[in-house]
Amino acid sequence: MYIIMNKIITNSFGIFILLIPLLLLLGLLFNNLSKRSFYPSNGKVEVSRIKSPVKIYFDDFGVPQIMSLNEEDAYFTLGYLHARDRLWQMDLTRRVAEGRLSEIFGASTINFDKLFRTIGINRFCYSWYNKLSPKTKQILDSYTKGVNYFIEANYNNLPVEFDALNFRPEPWKAEHSLMIVRLMGWDLNIAWYTDYIIGEIINKVGVEKTSEIFPDSNTSLYRKPQMEDTTKTDKEKTAAVNFNQIAQLGKDFFNYNEEYRKFFSINGAHVGSNSWVVSGAKSSSGKPMLANDPHLGLQAPSKWYEVYIRGGGLDVRGMSLAGVPGIAIGNNRFISWGLTNLMNDDNDFLILKRDSADNS
């Protein structure tokens, strides 16, 4: 028994001795990978794509302050900084909107890709860009150049997530910034849940009782067609959709959307954002006071990116969205502004019939 125990102790000690250098090596490799994308916060970066030198200061909290001589260079620099600090987040978000998560995550995200390709955020943004004003396009173009300059300059030294999944980000497009805005709108949208819930209730208790529960809703849209009514207009016939189809379609959307929210940990309670203003007549300073409290689900990193921008006609500070030029919530020298979500009815389900000539 004594000899056996000695062998066990000896073997265990030998294994432990072998593991120590292996663990040290793995620790050094992980430390190197994780710090590769800790880009310097001082020094100079030579850039040929800006008109004039730009200075960037970081305060004690790491908040950047962009000092530029013109707006184009200011937006270029904002794009550069967003990519520097949030490129992985930006790339992942545009992949959600485009329905391209499965390219990097595999089969586990196919349902999310189906969901967002059906919603069509990417298709809308490509058509939307053509309708933007020349000024807006100029801002997006300057910002996009800044993002892409960072990607090109650091192509072999990008955040560890790109190495872990063995891919490199594609060039940024102006439409990708639009997609991030629209995707945030989708994440904050809960109006379509109403159609799904009403469809489910109708399946349980019928149209008449449901109209009593929701007297302000147009439950006639959910009535199940009984027979062909030649007295109805085409519009009325279209409205008389099969509520079983509505309920099933809503259930698929509901399930896919819930899976997507859980996958990205944005399914926490965050209902109830608000904005309000107190008149200067009621404040001690005599100036109006703005309070803005947008309730978003907690994420790491946050959707927000704090920054101060000065250049040309810009002198603004506040919260930007990673991947989007400009300040969403903040102030300039004259005014402050905030935002909150409007719970309006901005979604509808459409039941489409396949063209009999379509064999795809």
Image (cartoon, rainbow, N blue to C red):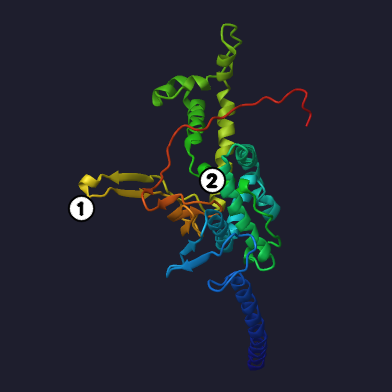
> Could you say which quadrant of the image residue 348 lies in?
top right
Q: Position of residue 341 (x, y in %)?
A: 43, 42
Q: Position of residue 289 (x, y in %)?
A: 29, 49
Q: What's the distance in space between the residues labelled 2 and 1, CA to CA?
A: 37 Å
The reply to whether residue 96 is visible in this rendering is no
> Could you say which quadrant of the image residue 16 lies in?
bottom right
Local secondary structure at mark 1: loop
Q: Nearer the viewer, residue 228 or 282?
A: 282
Give the position of the C terminus as an image quadrant.
top right
What is the three-letter code of the residue carrying label 2? Val
Q: Could you tell me if the residues under marks 2 and 1 are in contact, i.e. CB atoms within 8 Å? A: no
Figure check: 114 above or below 104? above
- Picture disc at residue 181: 2
Q: How many marks?
A: 2
What is the three-letter code of the residue carrying label 1? Ser
Residue highlighted by disc 1: 284
- Specify whether 324 is left or right of 295: right
Figure check: 187 above or below 25? above
Q: Position of residue 49 (x, y in %)?
A: 64, 60
Q: Nearer the viewer, residue 145 or 6?
A: 145
* Residue name at image x 61 percent, y 10 percent: 228
Discs 2/1, front: 1
Q: Residues within 10 Å of mark 2 (few under 14, many from 20)?
A: some
Q: Nearer the viewer, residue 331 or 9?
A: 331
